[in-house]
Image (spheres, rainbow, N blue to C red):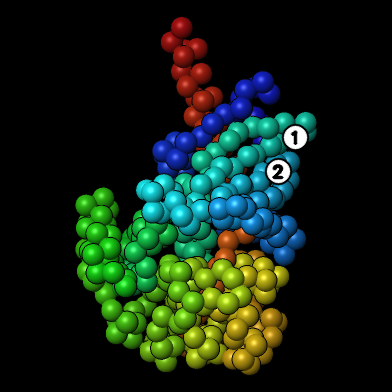
Amino acid sequence: MASPVSQQQILYVSGNQMREALSPTAAVNALQSVLEVGLDPELDAPRTRVNTSSGLFLQMPSTWQDIVGTKLLTITEANAAIGEPVIQGLYAIFGGESQAPLAIIDGIELTNLRTSAVSALGARLVSNSPSKELLVFGTGVQAWAHIRTFADVFGISKVRVVGRNPENARALIDRVSTELGLDGDIGSVADVSEADLIVCCTASSEPLFDGNQVRDHAVVVAMGAHDPTSRELDDVLLQRANVVVESRDSAMREAGDVIQAIDSGAIRDATELLTLAEVVSGVRKPMPDRPTVFKTTGMPWQDLIIARSVLEVLHTANALSEEALSSNA
């Protein structure tokens, strides 16, 4: 990939620039395209975590073809009390034959887009006829990012939000109506039995609903739990469903829903899990007439591919601008 800047200059890409450069649908397409040409998530490096004096420091390195990148994040829970972001970070990307630094990218906006794009990719790959209505558990940043992305990818027209805090749920619904022009309403656990598309974006450590209530053809995306002790889905659902993950290795390290279901016997072992790469290639397909769960914890390769796509768009835009200036000179 050609560098959008000289080696003496490192580009900084803000969150606003990233949103303008890459739509949610384009982000989903970018992730699918690299899986189609052979990127193997099982080879991705695991994220590393370091305890700090005030929280956690995370690093997520990855490489693909001639690009290398890593995301650096701090998680400081005490920041919430002083009005500062709990999660702060950046993404550094290098490339070309010399592996020179190319850009620093806003890590929070990248995470929001990447996470929701991965969820939408999983849902798109396993949905025979995607629903135009979305049931969302959670009211935070990721709930909003997922609604925005799913609306763009699937043409969602109505959103129901289930949250522990009614005020937060109402605020999210108002934002959905104002910024996206969608119908929104307060949802409840009872809505699970009528939902075709469910997204779980919570920090829950316990299942959010009874898996018996999920419809046979429903698609359930669970992205909130990303450690072995937490889960959003119960054993009943995981035993009934096709279970798709980003990679078996990462799922067995971080996906509490999957780890606990295997420990209990609801899932026999990791070989029962389908991976995104297998579904994309057609090597394995979800069985019909049962729910499909896509369990995602996020992986470094996803950040890298989204970051690369953003730089490619900016490089093209810069080249076109320079061409226009030259022609008008």
Residue at the image point whose x is 55% and y is 39% from the top: 105
Question: Mark 1 = which residue?
Answer: 99
Q: Secondary structure at mark 1?
A: loop
Judge whether residue 75 can be spotted in this image. yes
Q: Position of residue 283 (x, y in %)?
A: 67, 73
Question: Could you tell me how far apart the alpha carbons at marks 1 and 2 are, in whole angstroms?
Answer: 8 Å
Q: Which kind of residue does numbered mark 1 sit on?
A: Gln
Place residue 129 in its image quadrant. Answer: bottom left
**Which circle marks residue 3 in the picture?**
none
Instruction: Tell me if mark 1 has few (under 14), some (14-19) or many (20+) residues whose alpha carbon lies within 10 angstroms of its own.
Output: few
Question: Mark 2 = which residue?
Answer: 68
Residue at the image point whose x is 56% and y is 55% from the top: 55
Seen in the image, is 101 located left or right of residue 323? right
Q: Position of residue 324 (x, y in %)?
A: 46, 18
Image height of 13 relative to 261, above or below: above
Q: Secondary structure at mark 2?
A: strand
Report if the CB atoms under discs 1 and 2 are less than 8 Å apart: yes
Seen in the image, is 156 located left or right of residue 277? left
Q: Earlier in the sequence, mark 1 or mark 2?
A: 2
Q: Which kind of residue does numbered mark 2 sit on?
A: Val
Image height of 18 relative to 100, above or below: below
Judge whether residue 29 can be spotted in this image. no
Instruction: Tell me if mark 2 has few (under 14), some (14-19) or many (20+) residues whose alpha carbon lies within 10 angstroms of its own.
Output: many
Seen in the image, is 297 located left or right of residue 269? left
